[in-house]
Amino acid sequence: MSALESRCLTVHRGDRAVLREVDVRVRPGQVVAVVGPNGAGKSTLLGALAGDLRPASGAVLLDGEPLGSLSPRALARRRAVMRQDATLAFPFPVAEVVLMGRLPHGGRGNAADHAAVDAALRRAGAAHLAARPFPGLSGGERQRVSLARALAQVWGDAPAGRYLLLDEPTAALDLGAAHAALACARAFAAAGGGVLCVLHDLNEAVRYADEVVLLGGGRRVAAGRPGAVLRAGVLSTVYGVPVEILEAAGGRFVTVAPAGRAEGEVER
Amino acid sequence: MWTLLSLWVALAAPPAEPRLVTLGVGVTETVFALGLGDAVVGVDTSSLVPAEATKRPKVGYVRAASAEGILALKPTLVLADDALGPPPLKGQLEAVGVKVVVLPKAETVEDAAARVRAVGEAVGRKAAADELAVAIMTAAAEVRPKKPAARALFVFVHGGATLQVAGKGTGAHAMLTAAGAENAVQGYAGYRPLTAEAVVLARPTVVVTTTRALAAAGGEEALWRSPGLAATPAGQARRLVVLDDALLLAFGPRTGLAVAALAEALGQP
Amino acid sequence: MTAAALFAARRRRHLTRLGALGVALGLAVIVAAGTGAMRIAPSTVVGALAEAIGLSTPWATAPDEAAVLWAIRLPRVVLAALVGAALAVTGALCQGLFRNPLADPGLVGVASGAALGASAVIVLGVGAALPLTVALPAAAFLGGVLFTVLAHRVAVRGGRTDVATLLLAGIGLNAVGFAGLGLLTFVADDAQLRGLTFWLLGSLGGATWPAVAAAAPGLVLPVVLAAWLARPLDALVLGETEAAHLGVPVERVRRAVVALVALGVGAAVAVTGTIGFVGLVVPQGVRLLAGPDHRVTLPGSALAGAALLVGADAVARTVAAPAEVPVGVVTTLIGAPAFLTLLWGRRS
């Protein structure tokens, strides 16, 4: 079955289990958001799905095959990862950085690679940055370029059956850019790819995700459709603040309840 | 007889003028002493005597000489002491057909005489070299050591907190012994730094050094201020013997004179 | 501007810069072959070279001049080019691996290991059964490789090389190497001490065809094999995790770089002693000139490193002729101020 999934995944850092028995599944055509408070294990889960971290127990499977059985290059052709805070040791121009996404496909810089770079830059809203040196960019601009690099890696010809792992892709972006980035992830899913996306903003999860996985203390607290997972009670417990769900303009919005208005105020 | 001999020399000698490159202070001095100074077309940077030698083109230090620099002087013979380097140099010179003679190491009076003979043989001045070698041995043999022998501390380099002194197996040790003195440093071999306490324990009655080492130390007063030295019998009596580097440690034709000069200086109260 | 146009422009720029460096190397070789303590006319040099490849020229070559050219000067120019290329390329590889433009190929302990090996021969008489011209480079090479292997062993944890630990292990081993060198300096007699000092200063004076032939594989292989590492090192610029996400076998790249550095620097130090700053400054300069892409930094460093050392050696041979200045002093006199200028420029 086509999916990128973890099964009963436990990951240790040192002696401590930072992720316990977590099941997550991303199918082609889906955007899955991973949410939860700081230290819940979101980035660890993303790292394990990317193949960076070795599970202490359980497994990560790509279309039914354990990640460890795939060569780094075969894996890189089928999934791309965008992490936070990209830095560059040497001042490459943006287009070269994005071209690096073509590396698992040969990356010799032929016409197909150039077309993929152009498309990725355009989709990530970074076409105007192509000739700029990467180290001179702002945080938000870097994030767009990193997204473009990840897109170039898995959205060259056919994104179907390929996966995109995004760690807080909107962290440094303004409202418009954040929308553009998540819309881009949705478009990738619409073209047949699968997206797993760590998000801080629960409202982004509500708006753009097909499924939400809520982590707390290294465990999967809830998973399912955003409307089913993001409920005031469970969010209040997991985040440790009173949370309200507002309905307006045909959508649902998560917010922290103003002081004195919550019914069951949670102990701080 | 002489006519025959000179005829033989004329026939045996190479048709062109000999052109010599000499490396090492003792070797260069010997070649000049044998009357072949005019044939020397290049020397190394350690060849400081005679003064005439310093006017020749320099091909670098004997241990790091330049092959092409030597060849540019178009030598017919290269004479060097045992330190000749870098290691491949001899092979490089011989590969282009230049004759190279590396002379044996010389660190005693006997070595010096033997090396003078070897140089004489290499440049075809055997008779003159034999005479010179005999003169070296004779001058050294004429030394009449005083009793009791002076305990001499040979200070080689002075740098920082400790004195660099000559132990056994060094040229300086051989010269001290030949001059009838006793080396105050017996527990060491080679040139070694000696701590202030060890200097005191060595109880030298006289300090021997060279002109250049004394200059490097900053003069006589500075030398006596070296740690430990003032507390020795030599320090209290301010007994210091200074000889020219090239005279004392060249192991060339003047080594016999050097022994005599050192013995005389040590004998003076 | 489309990516295709941008890449085409960059490629043209890379090729013209590499071409310029190639021309610089060619000029350096011709000038270096034509200068030296022995006066040999340029026409003689050209004539001798042409004769060697079967061409006849109107220029007669005096036999003794040709002999000096072939036996002394040309092996030296060739060795300078190979050593310069190897040092600069291994420097570029190290800077790529450590993701730091200030990394030096000596960081992994290879230079101090080689120095210790050489001093063991000079002072302790290790390998005295062999001629010094064999024992000295062999011991230096083995010492360099041994120290690099040790540094790498320390840095491997669970089959994975930790680059930060590798750096620290290299620093530790360099300290051990220099302490050992200090100890041997103490044990050495005056003559050995002077021999050691001149070895440490670095010189191409020992260049003979057999020495060039013996060192050539160690010097040429890292330069050639580096080509396969250009793209992986580009990816590594993004970070080790990012490179792994791009399908780069990061651990294999790390090991390959360490092996090539041990081989290249070990062979270079073995035949010439320590020649400083080529590996540090040349890749820097090439990056400033042509950009950070390893597909241009690596070959560019090879050309520029070769040109620099050939030129520096020509200077070393001629400024004090018929004596010569140690070439390590010349490269350091050029390299150290360049390095400090670079650091100064990075303050902001």
Image (cartoon, grey):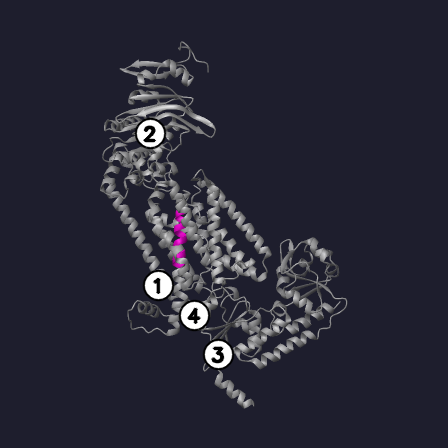
**Local secondary structure at mark 3:** loop
- Tell me which chain the residue with mark 1 is part of: C
Residue pointed to by mark 2: A61
Determine if marks 4 and 3 fall on one subunit: yes
Residue C271 drawn in magenta: no
Which residues are drawn in magenta?
A: C80-93
The prevailing secondary structure element of the residues shown in magenta is helix
Image coords of residue C28 (percent x, y): 36, 60
Q: Quadrant of residue B259?
A: bottom right
Image coords of residue B260 (percent x, y): 68, 72
Residue pointed to by mark 3: B18
Circle nearer the viewer, 1 or 4: 4
> Could you tell me if residue B33 is visible in this image?
yes
Residue C86 drawn in magenta: yes
* Number of numbered labels in the structure image: 4
Give the distance between the C-alpha atoms of the residues marked 4 and 3, in whole angstroms: 20 Å
Determine if marks 1 and 3 fall on one subunit: no
Residue pointed to by mark 1: C30
Circle nearer the viewer, 1 or 2: 2
Give the distance between the C-alpha atoms of the residues marked 4 and 2, in whole angstroms: 69 Å
Residue pointed to by mark 4: B95
Give the distance between the C-alpha atoms of the residues marked 1 and 3, in whole angstroms: 34 Å
Q: Are marks 3 and 2 in contact (CB under 8 Å)?
A: no
**Local secondary structure at mark 1:** helix
Q: Quadrant of residue B92?
A: bottom left
> Could you tell me if residue A131 is visible in this image?
no
